[in-house]
Image (tube, rainbow, N blue to C red):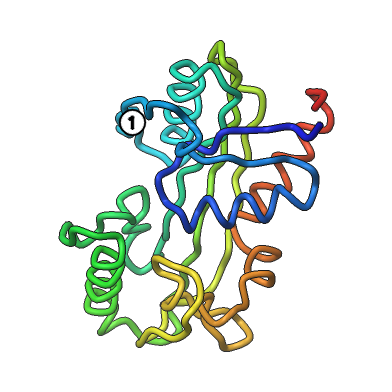
Amino acid sequence: MPMQVLLATSNPHKLEEVAAILGDIGIEVVGLDVLDETPPEPVEDAASFEGNARLKAVGYARMTGRRCLADDSGLEVDALGGTPGIHSARYAGIGDTRAERDAANNAKLIEAMHAVPDGERSARFVCCMCLADPDGTIVAEARGTFDGTIARAPAGEHGFGYDPLLLLPEGMSSAELIPDEKNRRSHRAEAARMLVEQLSRRIEP
């Protein structure tokens, strides 16, 4: 039987990505929709991606009695001092749906970066993952990054969030990568690989 973990997210895109990445190495990832009753979401009030991932993993693990995987991820833009950072999901502060929030966030970032020269537009996606057991014990943590620059206009139909604006070294955006390629290279993939390395040493499936 494969190891099964509950992914603490309501983001279907994130669930799909993590399930694809970890499924290749024998870990079954299920979402909150498998629960009879969804517990209240822990307050993400930490000052870092790592801290918020821990809060979610430990909180959901204790509330559900399941081994729980959580991640906190976002975009760091050097010219903006690391903004939007942990506030990436609601950077613009508007939008009722995920698609509306993504569009507003991208529009605000384009405006904020309007006057920044091409040589100073470095940025990266960051993903911090934490796996916790039902008693709240943290058994593994990992951090992955996906580096590029901020484009002046969105491009690509794949991905979600800021994917259309992260321009990769080869000249295409993260949203122009096919899903399999993104899952192989992304910040989430890097964090997942590091997590799996720790799991192989620490716990038996």
| Position in image of residue 187 (x %, y %) | 59, 57
Estimate the x, y position of residue 129 in percent, counting from the top left.
57, 40
Query: Which sits in the foreground, 112 or 63?
Result: 63
Q: Which quadrant, please, contains the C terminus?
A: top right
Residue in the picture at 36% in, 87% down = 152
Give the residue displayed 42% in from the left and 60% down from the top: 75
**Which residue is found at the position 66% from the left and 23% from the top?**
139
State the SS at label 1.
loop
Category of crowding for the residue at label 1, using alpha-carbon neighbours closer than 10 angstroms: few (below 14), some (14–19), many (at least 20): some
With 6 as the anchor, is 83 left or right in this view? left
Amino acid type of the residue that numbered disc 1 sits on in the rendered structure: Glu
Q: Position of residue 114 (x, y in %)?
A: 26, 83
Residue 59, compared with residue 100, is above or below; it is above
- Percent x, y for residue 153? 35, 87
Q: Is residue 89 left or right of residue 166?
A: left
Q: Is residue 31 left or right of residue 190?
A: left
Q: What residue is shown at x 41% (from left), y 77% (from top)?
A: 165
- Write down the quadrant of residue 103 in the picture: bottom left
* Residue at numbered disc 1: 41
